[in-house]
Image (cartoon, rainbow, N blue to C red):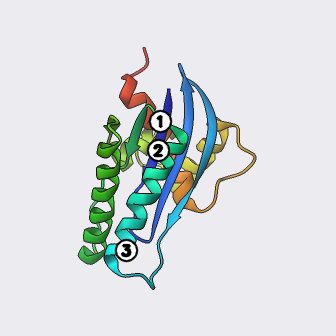
């Protein structure tokens, strides 16, 4: 099963693609969709949608995992990230793909075994689980791979 993980953001949307063959994980690719502060707000949202549409067409995932939005103290930022997440979900829906929405704690717990794990611990587990030479950069791409890893498990259901 091919899983596309998305770490939604307005400035940068991280993405990661893995193959999950019954728990045997393989790295396919990762990166970020970067929007420009020079562009108008609606153009930045279009860039997120168009970038994800292209990734879906290129990598042909079976399922998409998009992290749930966690509460942020800056309401303006939370609204912008929420809107970027909305256009990401629209791109997924347009492609007719199923999706799961892991929480940040599920991503931490599903990769490290601890719901309160630090970001660095999650990134190090991504390296181990996918047998990568180093932590993917930027952080949004590494986070998206962790989301993909956990998303594949959530879509399949818990392992017995």
Distance Cα–Cα, label 2 vs label 1 = 6 Å
Give the residue at x 39% y 69%. Answer: 10
As drawn, the residue found furthest toward the bottom would be 38
The numbered mark, 2 or 3, whose residue comes first in the sequence reads 3
Give the residue at x 50% y 52%. Answer: 15
Give the residue at x 30% y 50%. Answer: 89
- Left or right: 137 as drawn, with respect to 32: right
Nearer to me, 9 or 135: 9
* Above or below: residue 148 compared with residue 157: below
Distance Cα–Cα, label 3 vs label 1 = 26 Å
Q: Secondary structure at mark 2?
A: helix
Nearer to me, 130 or 85: 85
Q: Mark 3 near mark 1, Cβ–Cβ under 8 Å?
A: no
Tell me where residue 72 appears, x and y as whole percent: 29, 67
Q: Mark 2 near mark 1, Cβ–Cβ under 8 Å?
A: yes
* Above or below: residue 82 compared with residue 24: below
The numbered mark, 3 or 1, whose residue comes first in the sequence reads 3
The number of numbered discs placed on residues in the rendered structure image is: 3
**For residue 70, which numbered disc appears in the image?**
none
Disc 1 crowd rating (10 Å Cα; few below 14, some 14-19, many 20+) is some
- Left or right: 145 as drawn, with respect to 47: right
Disc 3 crowd rating (10 Å Cα; few below 14, some 14-19, many 20+) is few
Q: Mark 2 near mark 3, Cβ–Cβ under 8 Å?
A: no
Q: Quadrant of residue 62?
A: top left
Distance Cα–Cα, label 2 vs label 3 = 20 Å
**For residue 56, which numbered disc appears in the image?**
2
Q: Residue tagged by mark 1?
A: 61
**For residue 43, which numbered disc appears in the image?**
3
The numbered mark, 2 or 1, whose residue comes first in the sequence reads 2
Q: Quadrant of residue 8?
A: bottom left
């Amino acid at each position: 099963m091919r899983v596309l993980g998305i770490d939604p953001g307005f400035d940068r949307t991280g993405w990661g693609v893995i193959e999950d063959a019954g728990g045997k994980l393989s790295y396919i690719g990762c990166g970020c969709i970067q929007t420009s502060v020079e562009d108008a707000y609606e153009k930045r949202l279009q860039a997120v949608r168009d970038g994800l549409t292209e990734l879906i067409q290129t990598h042909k995932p079976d399922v998409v995992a998009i992290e749930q939005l966690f509460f942020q103290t800056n309401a303006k930022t939370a609204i912008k990230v929420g809107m970027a997440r909305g256009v990401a979900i629209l791109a997924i829906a347009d492609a007719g793909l199923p999706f799961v929405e892991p929480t940040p704690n599920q991503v931490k717990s599903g990769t490290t075994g601890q719901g309160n794990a630090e970001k660095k611990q999650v990134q190090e587990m991504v390296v181990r689980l996918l047998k990568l030479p180093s932590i993917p950069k930027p952080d949004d791409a590494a986070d998206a791979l962790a989301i993909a890893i956990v998303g594949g498990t959530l879509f399949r259901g818990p392992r017995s």
